[in-house]
Every structure is written in structure tokens, then in C-alpha cells.
Image (cartoon, rainbow, N blue to C red):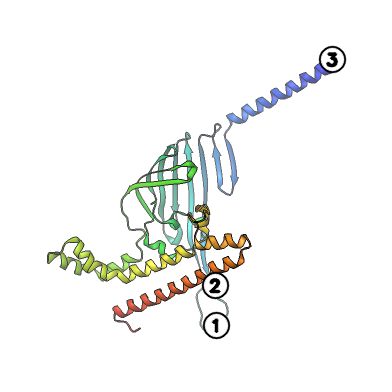
Amino acid sequence: MEALDQKQRILERQLELEREKADAKTKETPSLSFGEDGFVLRSADGDSKLRVGGYIHADGRFYVDDETKPATDTLLPRRVRPLFEGVLFKYFNFKLMPDFGDGKTAIFDAYFGVNYLPEAKLRIGKFKTPFGLEQLQSARTLEFVERALPSALVPNRDIGVQLHGEFRGGVLGYAVGVFNGVPDGARELIPLMQEQGAEEEEAARVLGASGFQTFWRVTLPNVKWGLLYGTILCNARAMGEFGAVSVVSGHIRGSTNTLPLHAEILYNEYNFSAAFVVASLLVLLALATLAARKLVEWKSRRSAGEPG
């Protein structure tokens, strides 16, 4: 019996040594995996990795029973974005993302970062500026192919340097930076200002007006209806946004909750009467927003001399 027990112990020890060798070999060998994030290549120590992925969004428009008024079917590749990003030696990261959508080629993201401290991270290159909430969300999380109209009023991607970080596990975050100032996010106002031209502003400066006077008496009156229209749409999106806010808000009552999120919480708690009241308030605000939008459109057409 003692001899059998001794042999059993020897076999168990040999198996344990084999497992230790296998674990040590695994730690020394890089790993390659594939999942919803694409292909991920990791170093043996896990301090470095490379991710290769991407996504494609298409906008298709197909018409049926259009014999009386034929329409053209279209399929537009809205976003075609391969993605290359990774981490080097644990504290350095990079990202490169071109875009081939809409028949054009552009570099959307190309930056290098230093993440030695969670409270102070440095990023240099071209990336999204920390301004618009919806713009900061990845296009992969959008419910529709296109973003909301208010996103056209905020900056998008720009070249610059940014310092950002988080405290208390992400409860508090900040981001400050210096950027080149490309007008990516002014798609609503810039075409209007280009159409109107700069003659009036130049005339005001020649006549001795200061920069503030030129802006207040010439530039702002020319774009006020477009600016007000965008503000109304932004307010509508702020009231009605659900998905993106639900991800980042934390659902803290009286602090980070919005009306749509509050209605959902009340409904999940089977407080249907209160949920109905909140939903009714949202409907009233939506009607008021529509009325304000129609009023601004009418005022804009009237100021432009168009028939109402």
C-alpha cells in the first residue's frame, strides 16, 4: 500500500510539473484571437496588443410599385472604415482609422497617446474633440445611419493635443486641449455664410466697426435664424436622446437622469401612472418644439422675402 501511495504521489507531481511547463510556455507565446472586436494579437506578457477591425454602414433606398412615378434605387456605402489600434508597452496607445465611404478617402483618426496615469493621459494627432456628446459616441452604436442634425453644429475631428483623465473610477472626468480649429462641425452655418458672402462684414470694418460690432450688427443678424433653428433641433435631441445618454449617465435620480430615462425607470418599477405623466410631459415639450420650429421656419422665409 505504501508503494502504491508513493507511485501516486510521484504521478501527481509529474502532472503538476507538466501543467507548470504548459503555463510557462503559454505566458511566453503571443496569442491571437477573433471576436466582435475583430482580430486581436497580444504579446506574451499582455502589455502590448494590436487590434484590426472595422465596420461598414450602407444607406439603401429601394422603391416598389413606382410605375407611375419611377424613382432610382440606390445603395450608398456611407461608412467604410478599417481600424488599426493598439497598445505598446502598457502605457502607450495608437489608432489609425481611414474612411472610404461616399466615394471619398480620408483619414478620420490618427493619433498617439500616453496613458501612464489614469488621471492624466496625453493624446496627440487627429481625433474627436471633447465637445458634442453624440459625436463622442462611436458610429457603431448609432441607431440610424446618420447622426442627429444638432451634431452638425459642434466640432467633430480635429488636429491637436489633448490632456484628459478620470478620477474615482470614472465618476469624474475631464478633457482640455489645443486644436487646429478646422470647421468640421459647422456644416449648417458655414454654407449659409458662404452664400451670403463677406461683403457686408468687409464694408463694416472699412467704416470703422470693431470686431464685436461687426459680429453683433452684421454677422449674427444674417445667420440668426439658422443658428436658432439648430438650437431648437439640439434641444429636441437633448430631450429625446435615450441610447447614448443611457450608456454614460449612470441613472442617478435627480442628478444625471433625463426625462426618457426617468420614464423607463418608473415603468420598470411598475409605477405606470407616474411613467405616463412623464411621457405626457415629453409629448407636450415635443409639440412646443415643433411649434417653435415652424415659427422659426416661417420667420426665416419671411425675412428672406419668400412667400409664407
Please state the horizontal and vertical placement of residue 197, each as a whole percent of the image.
24, 69
Q: Residue at point 32% right, 82% down?
A: 306
Q: CA distance from mark 2 to mark 3?
A: 81 Å
| 205 horizontally vs 49: left or right | left
- Residue under pointer 3: 3
The C terminus appears in which quarter of the rendering?
bottom left
Q: Nearer the viewer, residue 83 or 141?
A: 141
Identify the disc placed on residue 62.
2
Which quarter of the figure has residue 225?
Answer: bottom left
Percent of width and height locating residue 30:
57, 34
Image quarter of residue 112 = top left
N-term mark: 2 or 1: 2
Q: Secondary structure at mark 3?
A: helix
In space, the residues marked 2 and 1 are separated at their CA atoms by 13 Å
Q: Secondary structure at mark 1?
A: loop
Residue at the image position 50 percent from the left and 69 percent from the top = 281
